[in-house]
Image (cartoon, rainbow, N blue to C red):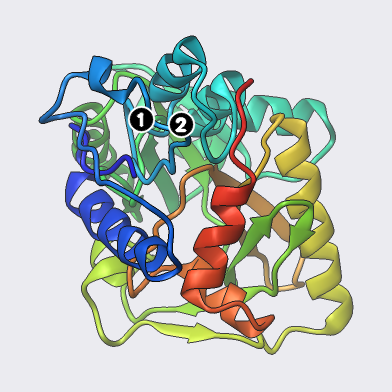
Amino acid sequence: MLLGGRSGERPISLLSGARVLEALRGAGVEAEGFDPAQRPLEELRGFGRAFIALHGSLGEDGAIQGVLEWMGIPYTGSGVAASALAMDKWRSKLIWGAAGLPTPRFERVLPGADCAGLAARLGLPLMVKPAREGSSLGISKVKGEQDLPAALREALAHDEVVIAEQFIAGPEVTVGILGEEALPLIRLETPREFYDYEAKYLANDTRYLIPSGLPAATEARVQRLALEAFAALGCRGWGRVDFMLDRDLEPYLLELNTVPGMTDHSLVPMAARAVGLDFGQLSLRILEQARVG
């Protein structure tokens, strides 16, 4: 069980890994926790399989996947290239756009960018995001042009690659992927400006609606798009695809997570429960799909 790591998402990874470790042991799996921030990677040799619960850089971006492939150790989730692409919001959106999949208008933003021009092209409000960070770290919703410089500084503190993205006003939904199956949609509601770090992991006022309450045709369309987005990046095993819907319920892809959270606030376990999979069964299903390459 790979957990912890060195990214800004280390605390969440420790929580995810501890829950999965407990579940696997409860199912009779001989499992051991392994924190790459505290142990040399050479000590991975000899393990039969690796369940990756590392979130963020060096865990979700293809780095640890490459180490495991070099050692010939089967691991859960997507491979090296797909992990790197999905972790990079800018490049994943370029690929989705080339594949004809809907995503909000966006631009890569460089230091010293023309904020007035950016606001004019994308409209306000807009979202400013580090391209290769998770858990909503470094993300800002910008309502006024005067707030753009501070939002850019915040995002650049997390990553040198930053994107600005058109804000889509409407329901936010997420789709878990397990194997080749799209799980039921979860509709997210928060009194905050957006589904930020606090709403994801700390708040008790976030609402998770499953069933989503959306029309059946809309739900089916979003599930199909999730599978198409997953395939377009070459992902495998499991993951989670996040969407915004506009006021006409047209869906727009936001991002794809190849190592979603597995905490008590996390979304894939909620969706799995809706189709009869408890946390232990879900953990085993993910582990069973471990492979090299």
Q: Secondary structure at mark 2?
A: helix
Q: Position of residue 155 (x, y in %)?
A: 26, 34
- The answer to whether 113 appears left or right of 51 in the picture is left
Q: Residue at x 38, y 65 (%)?
A: 195
Q: Quadrant of residue 203?
A: bottom left
12 over 211 or under it: above or below: above
- The answer to whether 233 appears left or right of 36 in the picture is right
Residue tagged 1:
115
Residue tagged 2:
118
Residue 117 visible (yes or no): yes
> Looking at the image, which is closer to me, 156 or 259?
259
Q: Secondary structure at mark 1?
A: helix
Q: Residue at x 76, y 72 (%)?
A: 248
Q: Position of residue 1 (x, y in %)?
A: 34, 44
- The local crowd at label 1, few if under 14, some if 14 to 19, many if 20 or more residues have their Cα within 10 Å, is some
Q: Are marks 1 and 2 in contact (CB under 8 Å)?
A: yes
Mark 1 and mark 2: Cα distance apart in space: 5 Å
> How many numbered markers are drawn?
2
Q: Quadrant of residue 38?
A: top left
203 over 153 or under it: above or below: below
Q: Position of residue 170 (x, y in %)?
A: 59, 71
